[in-house]
Amino acid sequence: MVLKRMVLEIGMGTDIRGTDPTKAACRAIRDALWHNSLSIAAALGHPLEAMHVDIRIGVPRPEQVDKAQVLAILPYGKGSVTVVEGGLEIRNDEGTDGTLIANACAIVSLDVA
């Protein structure tokens, strides 16, 4: 199998009144994916399920992200999720809550051998 990168999609997501890394990560990948309708697989004679989607998330406290929830957002294709330290967290004045920002990319590849 020879995977060839076809598409790079980028998104940002927030948990505005909370600091849930999974919520922000899910919103970030939705932002990346929901601005496009990829026809690359069909154009190359592949079914939609042949797409390989490598999801990468940058968020504070990456160990708290539920990767299964992020992966469940994919409408089709086979996916993987990698979460790293990144994003941004802004605490409120009292330090009791805040806003959390996640960045995401989806790298879509096809086997074109």
Image (spheres, rainbow, N blue to C red):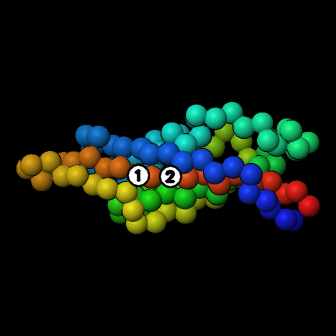
Q: To which residue does mark 2 refer?
A: 104
Q: Residue furthest left?
A: 94
User: Which amino acid type is shown beneath numbered disc 2?
Assistant: Ala
State the image quarter where residue 64 is shown: bottom left
State the image quarter where residue 80 is shown: bottom right
Residue at 40%, 66% in the rendered image:
85
Percent of width and height locating residue 40: 79, 41
Q: Count the marks: how many?
A: 2
Residue at 64%, 35% in the rendered image:
36
Residue closest to the eye, 54 or 9: 9
CB under 8 Å between discs 2 and 1: yes
Q: To which residue does mark 1 refer?
A: 102
Residue closest to the eye, 85 or 62: 85
Q: In this view, does 38 lie to the left or right of 87?
A: right
User: Which amino acid type is shown beneath numbered disc 1?
Assistant: Ala
Percent of width and height locating residue 42: 85, 38
SS label for mark 1: strand
Q: Is residue 113 left or right of residue 60?
A: right
Evaluate whether residue 4 shows in this view.
yes
Percent of width and height locating residue 7: 69, 49
Evaluate whether residue 22 shows in this view.
no
Residue at 49%, 62% in the rendered image:
83
Label 2 – label 1 distance at C-alpha? 7 Å
Residue at 74%, 51% in the rendered image:
6
Report the quarter where the C terminus lies: bottom right
Which disc number belongs to residue 25?
A: none
Q: Residues within 10 Å of mark 1 (few under 14, many from 20)?
A: many
SS label for mark 2: strand
Q: In this view, does 77 lie to the left or right of 56?
A: right
Q: How crowded is mark 2: few (under 14 residues within 10 Å), some or many (20 or more)?
A: many
Location of residue 83 with respect to 47 vertically, above or below: below
